[in-house]
Amino acid sequence: MTSEFEQGCPCGDGKVPNQEGKCVMPEVTFMALVMSLNSSALFHLGEIANPETGEKLVDFSLARHAIDTLMLLQEKTRGNLDADETEMLKNILYDVKIRFVQVVKDKKMAA
Protein backbone atom coordinates (compact mmCIF):
# COMPACT_ATOMS: atom_id res chain seq x y z
CA MET A 1 0.00 0.00 0.00
CA THR A 2 1.45 3.41 -0.95
CA SER A 3 1.03 6.55 1.10
CA GLU A 4 -0.62 9.77 -0.11
CA PHE A 5 2.87 11.30 -0.36
CA GLU A 6 4.25 8.48 -2.52
CA GLN A 7 1.23 8.72 -4.83
CA GLY A 8 2.02 12.40 -5.39
CA CYS A 9 -1.20 13.63 -3.79
CA PRO A 10 -0.66 17.14 -2.48
CA CYS A 11 -1.61 17.75 1.10
CA GLY A 12 -4.49 20.18 1.35
CA ASP A 13 -5.88 22.34 4.12
CA GLY A 14 -2.47 23.51 5.33
CA LYS A 15 -1.22 19.99 5.99
CA VAL A 16 2.29 18.74 5.24
CA PRO A 17 3.64 15.23 4.68
CA ASN A 18 5.31 13.62 7.69
CA GLN A 19 8.19 11.11 7.55
CA GLU A 20 5.77 8.31 6.73
CA GLY A 21 4.23 10.38 3.94
CA LYS A 22 0.90 10.92 5.65
CA CYS A 23 -0.61 14.41 5.52
CA VAL A 24 -0.60 15.97 8.98
CA MET A 25 -0.84 19.44 10.44
CA PRO A 26 2.58 21.11 10.74
CA GLU A 27 4.27 21.23 14.12
CA VAL A 28 3.16 24.14 16.30
CA THR A 29 6.20 26.35 16.98
CA PHE A 30 6.80 29.97 17.84
CA MET A 31 8.47 30.49 14.46
CA ALA A 32 5.45 28.99 12.64
CA LEU A 33 3.17 31.40 14.52
CA VAL A 34 5.35 34.37 13.56
CA MET A 35 5.47 33.24 9.93
CA SER A 36 1.68 32.86 9.88
CA LEU A 37 1.18 36.40 11.18
CA ASN A 38 3.74 37.67 8.67
CA SER A 39 1.88 35.94 5.84
CA SER A 40 -1.36 37.50 7.04
CA ALA A 41 0.18 40.98 7.05
CA LEU A 42 1.66 40.47 3.57
CA PHE A 43 -1.66 39.16 2.27
CA HIS A 44 -3.49 42.23 3.56
CA LEU A 45 -0.83 44.50 2.07
CA GLY A 46 -1.52 43.00 -1.34
CA GLU A 47 1.90 41.33 -1.46
CA ILE A 48 0.36 37.83 -1.65
CA ALA A 49 -2.49 37.02 -4.01
CA ASN A 50 -5.63 35.22 -2.92
CA PRO A 51 -4.86 31.59 -3.87
CA GLU A 52 -8.42 30.99 -5.09
CA THR A 53 -8.92 34.14 -7.18
CA GLY A 54 -5.39 35.36 -7.87
CA GLU A 55 -6.58 38.80 -6.77
CA LYS A 56 -4.40 41.05 -4.61
CA LEU A 57 -6.32 43.24 -2.18
CA VAL A 58 -5.11 45.83 0.30
CA ASP A 59 -6.72 46.19 3.72
CA PHE A 60 -4.66 48.52 5.89
CA SER A 61 -6.60 47.85 9.09
CA LEU A 62 -6.10 44.06 8.87
CA ALA A 63 -2.45 44.48 7.88
CA ARG A 64 -1.93 46.83 10.81
CA HIS A 65 -3.64 44.34 13.15
CA ALA A 66 -1.22 41.57 12.11
CA ILE A 67 1.75 43.94 12.58
CA ASP A 68 0.45 45.04 15.98
CA THR A 69 0.09 41.39 16.98
CA LEU A 70 3.71 40.72 15.97
CA MET A 71 4.81 43.78 17.98
CA LEU A 72 2.86 42.52 21.01
CA LEU A 73 4.54 39.12 20.70
CA GLN A 74 7.94 40.81 20.54
CA GLU A 75 7.19 42.85 23.65
CA LYS A 76 5.68 40.01 25.69
CA THR A 77 8.34 37.43 24.79
CA ARG A 78 11.38 39.71 25.24
CA GLY A 79 14.07 37.75 27.09
CA ASN A 80 12.28 34.42 26.66
CA LEU A 81 13.19 33.56 23.05
CA ASP A 82 16.30 31.89 21.73
CA ALA A 83 18.64 33.87 19.48
CA ASP A 84 17.15 32.52 16.22
CA GLU A 85 13.57 33.32 17.29
CA THR A 86 14.54 36.81 18.45
CA GLU A 87 16.37 37.58 15.21
CA MET A 88 13.61 36.21 13.00
CA LEU A 89 10.92 38.21 14.79
CA LYS A 90 13.03 41.39 14.64
CA ASN A 91 13.73 40.95 10.92
CA ILE A 92 10.13 40.12 10.02
CA LEU A 93 8.84 43.14 11.94
CA TYR A 94 11.33 45.44 10.25
CA ASP A 95 10.45 44.08 6.80
CA VAL A 96 6.68 44.19 7.21
CA LYS A 97 6.74 47.72 8.68
CA ILE A 98 8.79 48.96 5.70
CA ARG A 99 6.38 47.26 3.31
CA PHE A 100 3.40 48.81 5.11
CA VAL A 101 4.85 52.30 4.80
CA GLN A 102 5.67 51.71 1.11
CA VAL A 103 2.16 50.46 0.28
CA VAL A 104 0.59 53.45 2.09
CA LYS A 105 2.92 55.79 0.19
CA ASP A 106 2.14 54.11 -3.14
CA LYS A 107 -1.63 54.33 -2.51
CA LYS A 108 -1.37 58.05 -1.69
CA MET A 109 0.68 58.68 -4.85
CA ALA A 110 -1.89 56.81 -6.97
CA ALA A 111 -4.80 58.80 -5.52
Image (cartoon, rainbow, N blue to C red):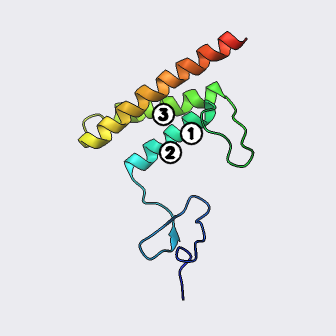
List the residue tagged with mark 2.
36
Q: Secondary structure at mark 2?
A: helix
Nearer-N-terminus badge (3/1): 1
- Along the line of sight, the residue nearer the viewer: 109 or 26: 109
Residue at 52% across, 24% down: 99
Is residue 77 in view? no
- Along the line of sight, the residue nearer the viewer: 54 or 35: 54
Badge 1 amino acid: Ser
Q: What is the quadrant of residue 87 in the picture?
A: top left
Badge 2 amino acid: Ser
| Residue 14 x/y as whole percent | 57, 58
Residues tagged 1 and 2 counted as in contact (Cβ below 8 A): yes
* Residue farthest toward the bottom in the current orientation of the protein: 1
* 34 with respect to 42 (left or right): left
Q: Mark 3: few, some, or many residues within 10 Å (few <14, many ≥20)? A: some
Q: What is the quadrant of residue 85 in the picture?
A: top left
Position of the C terminus, as image quadrant, is top right
Residue at 29% across, 34% down: 78
| Residue 26 x/y as whole percent | 47, 60
* 21 with respect to 10 (left or right): left
List the residue tagged with mark 3.
69
Number of numbered discs on residues: 3
Residue at 48% across, 28% down: 96
Up-down relation of residue 46 to residue 24 (above or below):
above
Up-down relation of residue 99 to residue 30 (above or below):
above
| Residue 64 x/y as whole percent | 56, 27
Q: Nearer the viewer, mark 3 or mark 1?
A: 1
- Res. 40 mark: 1
Badge 3 amino acid: Thr
| Residue 22 x/y as whole percent | 51, 74
* 63 with respect to 17 (left or right): right
